[in-house]
Image (cartoon, helix red, strand yellow):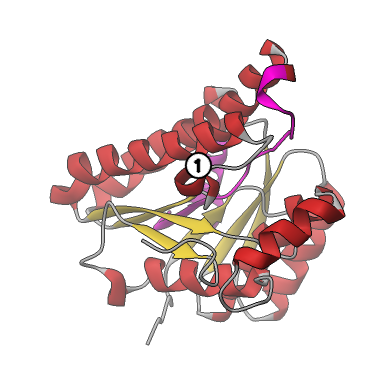
Amino acid sequence: MFDLSEKIALVTGASGSLGGEIAIALAEAGADVACHCHENLDRAAELRGQIEGLGRKSIVVQADLIISSEAERIVKETVEGLGGLHILVNNAGVNHQSLFLRQHPEMVEEVLIKNLASQMHVAHSASKVMARNKWGRLIHMGSVVAHMGSIAEVTYAASKAGIEGMSRGIARELGGRNVTSNVIAPGFISAGMAHEMSEERREYFMKLIALGRTGEPRDVAAAVVFLASEEANFITGAVLHVNGGMYMQ
């Protein structure tokens, strides 16, 4: 099960802890992987070496994804460098915590552009390749806060809610081309942005988690591999929550 042999994936934000874990998990399942980074080329190169050590092909693609032409370029480099594109993991993003009444317009614009607009740019370019080939998996990284809200993360929550709307629209448009589009909504994961929280906020979130522990990047990566696989071929327009019971629908 979950065999991704002969599949080619592009992971944005692969130089981060969560993105790196996702890239490794895809490679372990048999996929060749293009690792995107914005600035951290050293980490991306290290990740490429790890993937090649697993017997898979890998390249590093660098771009600022808020620029649509840059997003288009890394999709083109993936196709040319690895021979195609079947799976996109739209993982790159930012979060600036600030109480809503204190946040600056510049912060709002930055979070919305870097989280929502950049994901749309990459998805747009990747979708063209997948639609032509009549097979594709678009997997976008959302967040539990889009559903339950969070103090000092109003703009972040709005950007992640927008990602869900984008994904459902793509799912409707591209379903006839055998391209699925889904969102993974992580909860409190012990990597990346979670480290930026104050101890008080960490304790608050821990009390909400039914399983009584934080998630690990590997938990999210496993969900990505599932949605990228043939076993998930009848799932589209969905949101897969990976939150340990922090939020329940």
Q: Quadrant of the N terminus?
A: bottom left
Report the residue at 72% width, 79% height from top: 53
Q: Is residue 39 above or below residue 44?
A: above
Q: Which sits in the foreground, 230 or 160?
A: 160
Rendered residue at 74%/29% (across/down): 98
Vertical position of residue 123 compared to residue 130: above or below: above
Give the image location of residue 105, x and y in percent.
67, 12
Tag 1: amino acid = Val
Helix, strand or loop status at disc 1? helix
Where, by quadrant of the figure, is residue 172 drawn? top left
Farthest residue in the left direction?
A: 176
| Disc 1 residue crowd, few under 14, some 14–19, many 20+, Cα 10 Å | many
Q: Residue furthest top?
A: 105
The answer to whether residue 103 shows anywhere in this view is no
221 horizontally vs 133: left or right: right
Q: Is residue 28 visible in this depiction of the protein? A: yes
Q: Position of residue 139 (x, y in %)?
A: 43, 54
Can you say whether 202 is above or below 130 in the image?
below
The residue shown at (68%, 76%) is 213
Q: Kindly identify the residue that appears in the image at 59 percent across and 31 percent down.
A: 154
Q: Is residue 249 left or right of residue 67?
A: left
Q: How many marks?
A: 1
Front-lying residue, 218 or 178: 218
Q: x and y percent of residue 173 in the render?
A: 19, 39
Tell me which corner region of the image, top left, top right, bottom left or bottom right, holds residue 246: bottom right
Task: Report if residue 100 lies within the magenta region.
Answer: yes
Assign the C terminus to one quadrant of the image: bottom left
Residue labelled with disc 1: 75
10 inside magenta stretch: no
- Specify start and end residues of the magenta stretch as a single range: 73-101
